[in-house]
Image: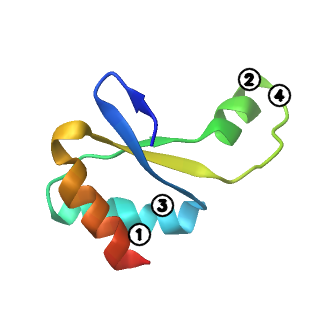
Amino acid sequence: MNQSQGFIKIFTGNAIDVLALRNALEEEKIVAVIKDDSESARLAGFGMVAPGLQEVFVHEDELDLAVRIVESLK
């Protein structure tokens, strides 16, 4: 799990799985940060090796509950 300024990556997957996870996290009042490198590259005019993959980050204070939610969706 990557860590940056108090946020930790908890999941990498396609847009549909990320949307389901984001909705489940929001039900528990957890705000997720979604990172989409392929969309950023597209907007900048670059290509991407693995298009469509997104990363989900949560604040470290909410990590335990967020990981349990990820596990329940698998």
**Viewer-nearest of discs 2 and 1:** 1
Q: CA distance from mark 4 to mark 1?
A: 28 Å
Q: Mark 1 = which residue?
A: 20
**In this figure, which colouring scheme has been used for the structure?**
rainbow
Q: Is residue 24 visible?
A: no
Does residue 11 lie above or below 68 as drawn? above
Task: Answer with mark 3 or mark 2, whichever residue precedes in sequence.
Answer: 3
Q: Nearer the viewer, residue 68 or 24?
A: 68
Q: Mark 4 = which residue?
A: 46
Q: Mark 3 = which residue?
A: 18
Q: Mark 2 = which residue?
A: 44
The mark found on residue 29 in the picture is none
Horizontal side, residue 2 vs residue 50: left or right: left
Quadrant of the frame with the N terminus: top left
Task: Answer with mark 2 or mark 1, whichever residue precedes in sequence.
Answer: 1
Q: Are marks 1 and 3 in contact (CB under 8 Å)?
A: yes
Task: Point out residue 3 in the picture as x, y percentages from the top left corner.
Answer: 40, 31
Q: Which residue lies at the image location 19% right of the left edge and 59% below the top edge?
A: 65
Q: Are marks 3 and 2 in contact (CB under 8 Å)?
A: no
